[in-house]
Image: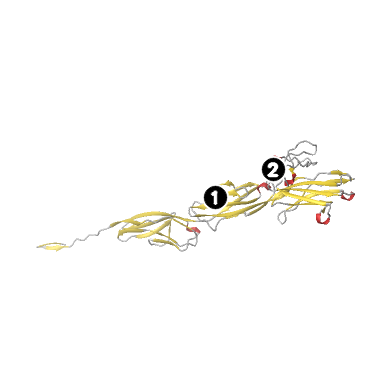
Amino acid sequence: MASNAAGSTNISTNLFISPRFLIRPQDVRTQIRFNESLTCEVESYPVPSYSWMKEGNVVGPSDYRYPFYPVEFGDEGEYTCIATSNSLSIDSSAIVHVSPLHSARTDPNVTNSVVNTPVTFNCLSLGGPNNMYYWVYDRTSERLSNVNELNVTSHASRGGSYTCTVGNQAGYDHAISTLNVAPEILIHPSPQNVTLAVESITLYCLVSGYPFPQVEWYLNDTQILPQSDTRVTITTVNNPTLIPGYDSMGEFSGSGLSDFGLGSGGDSLDIRNPFGVNLDVGDIKDPFGTVSSQLVIKDTTISDSGLYHCEGVIDNLFDDKPSQPALVLVQ
């Protein structure tokens, strides 16, 4: 107020305080079903108004606190608090990191395939931001891929489970895919001419697949069961040791088995291949998923003559895979 002998007058003015942060929102690392909030406090005159934006869109309450009660996967992302007073605005941002825990899954989670076909597994998840992925082949702990997609060429030695791990700054999760591989006959039983003096028939069969196939033997399409004939012995071994062998012409072919995995230092088995299918050790760099089977029939008789074949069997997943027949003549 100003006054003199002639009178007085009133003069008023407003004092504005520019907004400034007392508390800035801080990054949050959390997981679903937790209760969290972002807090943004600003000092100013007049009292500031608040708004929140997420990635360019207005969201949430017009309040200094943004609650997440409870946290959901979709809450991940960057949030910006905007405080405005007397047309002056300031802003500050924070990131809500939501763990992918309880969200990871694979597609497909099981694949039934045949040898040498391409297979693709995808790893899917929620939460974030910036989810990162990697795949591991569980049998060997080999790390295969650093993205959410895994490409594999189907082979028995690659059968089994693959684990995808997805993670971000708030946590991680796992999901598993399984690759099943149809049975394949790698070495077929060989035709034989057996004299009664020899007294026994010995046939070999090598099968691949995953899960490990069972190997069944047949004579003239009738299954051979050791429990029904005491002369019969069937020996089956998973993951046999591979050593050099010979083809049907007696030439070194680089294929064969060692003592059916029953011990070390055994002689090589002369597994002949009369059908001209070349199998090299290099074709089976990893014997995992291979099953060797040896059929022995003692005290042979003329009635043991006929067509023998083996079959790779993986129940409930694939059709049985028969070998080529081998004619055995007992004279």
Q: Is residue 160 left or right of residue 203?
A: left
Dot placed on the residue nearer the N-terminal end, 1 or 2: 1
For disc 2, the neighbor class at 10 Å (few under 14, some 14 to 19, many from 20) is some
Q: Check disc 1 and report the residue beneath it.
A: 133
* Residue 104 position by quadrant: bottom right
- Percent position of residue 84, x then y: 34, 58
Q: Is residue 281 left or right of residue 24?
A: right
Viewer-closest of 304 and 62:
304
- Percent position of residue 313, x then y: 74, 53
Q: Is residue 166 left or right of residue 180?
A: left
* Residue 81 position by quadrant: bottom left
- Percent position of residue 141, x then y: 60, 48
Q: Check disc 2 and report the residue beneath it.
A: 284
Q: Amino acid at mark 1?
A: Tyr
Q: Given contact means CB atoms under 8 Å apart, are the residues at marks 1 and 2 in contact?
A: no
Viewer-closest of 242 and 92:
242
Look at the numbered disc 1 and give the secondary structure of its residue.
Answer: strand
Look at the numbered disc 2 and give the secondary structure of its residue.
Answer: helix
Q: Is residue 89 left or right of residue 96?
A: left
Count of picture labels: 2
Q: Residue furthest top?
A: 251
Q: Residue at x 37, y 60 (%)?
A: 50
Rendered-image quadrant of the N terminus: bottom left
Q: Residue at x 35, y 54 (%)?
A: 90
Residue 121 appearing in the image: yes
Rendered-image quadrant of the C terminus: top right
Q: For marks 1 and 2, give the CA distance.
A: 30 Å
Q: Amino acid at mark 2?
A: Ile
Query: In the rendered view, would you say 317 is above or below 155?
Result: below
- Percent position of residue 6, x then y: 10, 62
